[in-house]
Image (cartoon, rainbow, N blue to C red):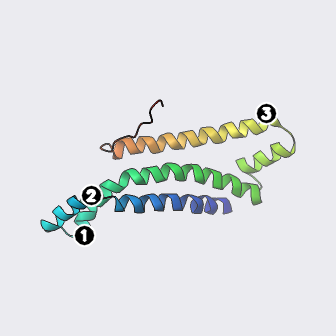
Amino acid sequence: MRDGYQAAVISFFPVLVNVIEGLRSADADRIQMLTVFGAGRFQVFRMVRLPSALPFLFAGLDIGIVFSILGAVVGEFVGAKEGLGYLLLQTNYNFDIAGMFAVLVVLSVLGLIAHFIIRFAQKRLVFWAEENRVIGA
C-alpha cells in the first residue's frame, strides 16, 4: 500500500511543473483579445490557457508514468512482501539472472504500454499541437 503513495508523490511534481509552465505559456495577445471582448476569467482559462497547457500536461504525464513505475518498484524494494520490485530483489539475491531479466522485461513492457496509452490520448485530445520531431529519429 505504501508504494502507491510513493508512486503518486514522485510523479506529482513533474506533472505539476509542466502544467504550471503550460498555463504560463498562453499567448498574451489572445488573452488580451478575449478580455477586450469582455470574456471573464473562466472563459479565458477555457479558451486560451487550458488548450495551451494540454500539450505540457501530457508531457508531464508521460514523464510521471515512468517516475511512478520507478517509485513503485523502489517502494517495493524498501518494505514490500510482494510485487515486481520484491521479485526483482529476490531474483537478485538468488543469482537468478534469467528471472531478473524477465522481471525487467515485464517492467519495460508495462512502461511502454503506459507510454503508448498516454501518446494515444494525447493524439486524440490535443490533435492541434505540433509534434516536435528530432532529426534522425
Residue visible at 53% across and 53% down? 64
Left-right relation of 69 to 17: right
Which residue lies under the disc numbered 3?
98
Specify few, some or many for label 1: CA neighbours under 10 Å numbering under 14, 14-19, or 20 or more: few
Residue visible at 48% across and 58% down? 15
> Which of 52/93 is in front?
52
Task: Pinpoint residue 98: horizontal percent, then vertical percent.
Answer: 79, 33
The vertical placement of 81 against 114, above or below, is: below
Amino acid identity at mark 3: Ala
SS under mark 3? helix
User: Can the viewer see residue 78 in this picture?
Assistant: yes
Mark closest to the chain's N terminus, 2 or 1: 2
Which residue lies under the disc numbered 1?
41
Spatial distance from mark 3 to mark 2, Cα to Cα? Answer: 53 Å
> Which of 77/131 is in front?
131
SS under mark 2? loop
Spatial distance from mark 2 to mark 1, Cα to Cα? Answer: 15 Å
Left-right relation of 22 to 76: left
Mark closest to the chain's N terminus, 1 or 3: 1
In the rendered image, the residue lying farthest to the top is 136
